[in-house]
Image: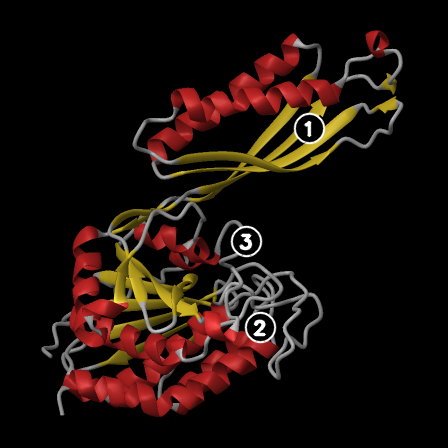
Amino acid sequence: MSIKDRVRSLAADISPKVVEMRRHIHANPELSFKEYETSKYVAGKLREIGLNPREGVADTGVVALIEGRNPSSKTVALRADMDALPIVEENDVPYKSRNEGVMHACGHDVHTASLLGAANILQEVRDSFEGTIKLIFQPGEERIPGGASLMIKEGVLQNPAPSGIIGQHVMPLVPVGKVGFRPGMYMASADELHVTVKGKGGHAAMPEMNIDPVLITSHMIVALQQVVSRFAPPKIPTVLSFGKIIANGATNVIPNEVHLQGTFRTLNEEWREEAHRRIKKLAEGLVESMGGTVDFEIKKGYPYLENNPELTDRAKENAIQYMGAENVVDLDIWMAGEDFAFYSQQVDACFYRLGIRNEEKGITSGVHTPTFDIDERALETGCGLMAWLALKELGISE
């Protein structure tokens, strides 16, 4: 039996166990940087297969090594995130969240279970490859500063240093049984905007007596779109959006302040820094010209995610070998943010998408929604393909 067929067979055999692990994690979700029970569960599952996991990396992260022959020859890393979101689950399933107000609505339960499954496969075939596979179970992907940045600071990319890192993420737009790749620019940087526009409130019937922060804010929001439409480089996707505006007045009351929250996203670090300066300068100048003041805070979040072209092209070809060309698709740029981007700024990286959609079963909800779920057949693909991609990066032949 070829190593590829052996990986496929092991993935099929272990699939029920991976489903069981995913359901346990899904039913017991924990918020970012509070993944204490999840971390213990992951470490326990790794010990069951004979590994010696290192716990407590960035507090709740877990790292383990699977060593083949000549373990110092080359190292490749595989990463999964473990945290959930503050969402009330609406699915009526046996594995529904038991932690009220917390839900695995972004598929991190799938990522963690898939990597645990891959670990089982790789441990089983460890006599067949040379090198080391580093397993990274990461906390806090959903919350700035991002668990990836903290794990990097604590040396997760050292001792041994991987030549590349591979991660996967569920994709509700891609049918189950398929995966997607995109080399180069893939996901956006993600910065938070926290703004307070200050004026002078009063009776709405006497605007001449006031400095209206609602009107000023309206002009500011519209004017800030010039940063995107007039200054963004033509080939660099850029988004500036405000999703929360609080002007706590009334029908006849102009408030003293307006509070806003928004996001700025792009796919170039130099332009990102320039845009930050332009955004603040434009906002401060416009608000001041209308008689108000503004506190404009930009909380710098994740960098943009760059898929190393050579590693990603290899991964795509290896996925075709494993799954067939008809099951491997090309992806468009995705303006969401991901803290896997921190790894991509440090080492060759490939972040690909795992299809989970099944329209016949009604599994179509997007991530970050209370009805998000997956076709669990994706878990066999998820664990098998991750194991196969790691083996191929270590130079194993088909």
Instruction: Report the number of numbered marks.
Output: 3
- Tell which of 43 and 285 is nearer to you: 285
Mark identifier at residue 36: 2
- Tell which of 364 and 56 is nearer to you: 364
Secondary structure at numbered mark 2: helix
Residue flagged by tag 3: what amino acid is it? Arg
Secondary structure at numbered mark 3: loop
Read off the residue under disc 1.
196
Residue flagged by tag 1: what amino acid is it? Thr
Q: Is there a contact, CB below 8 Å, between mark 3 and mark 2?
A: no
Q: Is residue 71 above or below residue 213?
A: below
- Tell which of 225 and 292 is nearer to you: 225
Q: Quadrant of residue 235?
A: top left
Relative placement, left or right, of 374 versus 272 is right
Which of pointers 3 and 2 lies earlier in the amino acid sequence?
Answer: 2
Read off the residue under disc 3.
143
Q: Which colour style is shown?
A: secondary structure
Residue flagged by tag 2: what amino acid is it? Tyr
What residue appears at the point 34 percent right and 64 percent down from the top-left corner?
A: 167
What residue appears at the point 65 percent right and 25 percent down from the top-left corner?
A: 295
Q: Is residue 392 above or below residue 267?
A: below
